[in-house]
Image (tube, helix red, strand yellow):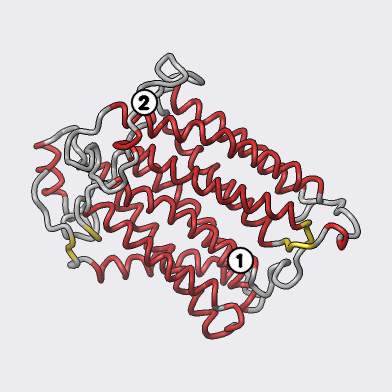
Amino acid sequence: MQEVELFNLGPVLQLLLLAIVVALGPLSWVWLRHRHHDVPQRVHQLTALTLFLCFDLVVFGAFTRLSDSGLGCPDWPGCYGHASPLGAGEAIETAQTAMPSGPVTLSKAWVEMVHRYLAMTVGVLILTLAAFSWRRDRSVWGWPTLSLVWVCVQGAFGAFTVTMKLFPAIVSMHLLGGMVLLVLLLLQLLRQRHAPWAEYRLPLPTPVRGWLKLSACLLLLQVLLGAWVSSNYAVMACDTYPLCQGTWWPEMNFDKGFAVWRALGLDSQGQALPFQALTAIHFVHRWHAVPVALLLLWSSVLLYQHGLSLQSRGLWLLVLLQFMTGISNAVLGWPLLAALLHTASAAGLLLLLSWSLAITESRPPGHIAATFSRPVL
């Protein structure tokens, strides 16, 4: 790959203007579609749409990684100093000619830049939501402000993902940060004045909420382990299930596999990462999924028993989808659709658990008079 200036701020103004123009689309759609509602109701609808777009961004980020497009434009924030691959055509063609199967091609450049455009659009919408909260409803400014701060952190992770050449630790934190941003937007949505659960929360026994919190923590850890597998390209280290390389305990190198601060494909001493390290990364993610799945299924049962049947069924279905796509990633050679569904269902599980915790509060079992008999929306 030809040498380029990693941080080139030349196209920043053009990119900001483009993000504002694109963000005006969903903003105008919400304002016109709900023109008969008051401003807080329209802000509520805009928050829901921003959450949806952020979910799309997380999945598209997985597509960018899985299609090897993360370095399609090897500088940041533009593409060879331009706001789009159109202006960088000559540089892209030169890089592609030098390495036809390398990280820079015209299609990969477009995938990478579309991901950045979507990220900037979501950032503009989050800034808009924060501005509305500061101006019109300061009682709920906390979550919008935190979301705005976090999307800026995510932008920094995105920049370092490119400039540090897909450094596994940075890529993993970027994916985890996207999941956290989804949760922040969900909490922001649920705490707005027009949300059904802005003030009233359903009572749940303290032990039940404890199980839900434990499930959420272990799920976050599993997401991080999955990001570590993906960012190190360790999915195919075990291409059978449940055995790995024909045995229950293959040869593994945990020290090198889980050395955090190292470049892609290298160990902490700069030597080529051995295959045994990739096996260790895959193996830990695979078997940590077992207690996580069991805990999620148990949480599903508890939610159903206490009237949260919608969330309960959602957890059960998404755990099943995670199991099916996780196995297919290994035994079918990492198919793109299965890999994307694996990321999407992980995000869905985290949102369902966060939703369940956000609309409930702990109560001693003796203070809960009755079990809810209908699904909670």
Badge 2 density bin: few <14, some 14–19, many ≥20, Cα 10 Å = many
| Viewer-nearest of discs 2 and 1 | 2
x%, y% of residue 157? 33, 58
How many numbered discs, if any?
Answer: 2
Task: Find residue 26 and report its horizontal and vertical position in percent.
Answer: 50, 64
Outermost front residue: 255
Q: Is residue 208 left or right of residue 273?
A: right
Q: What amino acid type should be assigned to the residue bearing mark 2? A: Ala
**Residue in the image at 16% along x and 60% along y:** 81
Residue visible at 87% across and 63% down in the picture: 367
Front-most of 35 and 290?
Answer: 290
On the image, the x and y values in percent for residue 331 come to: 45, 21
SS at circle 1: helix
Work out which residue is located at the far top of the displayed protein and give it. 246
Q: Which mark is residue 28?
A: none
Q: Mark 1 or mark 2, which is nearer the start of the sequence?
A: 1
Residue at (62, 74) in percent of width and height: 35
Q: Secondary structure at mark 2?
A: helix
- Of the 4 image quadrants, the one containing the C terminus is bottom right
Query: Is residue 157 found left or right of 78 in the rendered image?
Result: right
Q: Amino acid at mark 1?
A: Leu
Q: Is residue 241 above or below residue 21?
A: above
Residue at image position (9%, 37%) is 98
Question: Looking at this view, is 183 or 367 the one in front?
Answer: 367
Residue 336, by quadrant, is top left
Residue 192, percent across and down?
64, 72
Q: Residues within 10 Å of mark 1 (few under 14, many from 20)?
A: many
Mark 1 lies on residue: 189
Which mark identifies residue 237? 2
Left or right of 351? Residue 5 is left
Looking at the image, the residue that sits furthest to the right is 369
Separation of residues labelled 2 and 1 (CA atoms): 40 Å
